[in-house]
Amino acid sequence: MLKKIMDECGVAQNTQNQVCLAISHIGYNKRLKGILPTTLEGKIVSDTDMCDALGANGILRVYAYQNKKGKPFLIEKYFL
């Protein structure tokens, strides 16, 4: 279905293959099995998916834990 939509939108075949490969490597259960995305874009989407799965309360719990241990929650040099 996704490939059909991308075809209709005129997405190049190479890009379609990259999107489908990234999608096939994203998900909590796949991560548990050691299946990880290989591209930067796939890693970003995977991390976003994990944050979404944690939810706001989960992210706040991670922040509180890191703060209690005296560790940074965010390392700015990775986001500049």
Image (tube, grey):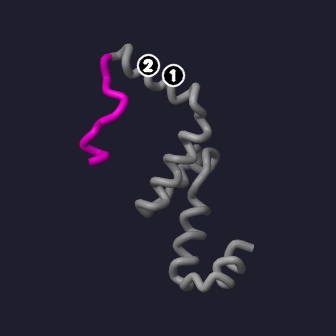
Q: Which residue is labeled 1 in the image?
A: 61
| Residue 56, image x, y percentages | 57, 30
Is 46 located above or below residue 65 in the figure?
Answer: below
- The residue singled out by tag 2 in the image is 65
Crowd rating for badge 2 (residues with CA inside 10 Å; few <14, some 14–19, many 20+) = few
Labels 1 & 2 near each other (Cβ < 8 A): yes
The residue type indicated by label 2 comes to Tyr
Q: Is residue 45 left or right of residue 28?
A: left
The residue drawn where x is 58% and y is 44% is 32
* Quadrant in which residue 13 is drawn: bottom right
Disc number for residue 34: none
- Left or right, 64 with respect to 21, comes to left
Give coordinates of residue 24: x percent, y percent.
61, 62
Q: Residues within 10 Å of mark 1 (few under 14, many from 20)?
A: few
Task: Write the start and end of the magenta stretch as one range.
Answer: 70-80
Location of the N terminus (image quadrant): bottom right
Magenta span dominant secondary structure = loop
Q: Relative to residue 11, is residue 30 depicted above or below?
A: above
Classify 38 as above or below 73. below
* Secondary structure under the numbered disc 2 in the rendered image: helix
Q: Is residue 9 left or right of residue 38?
A: right
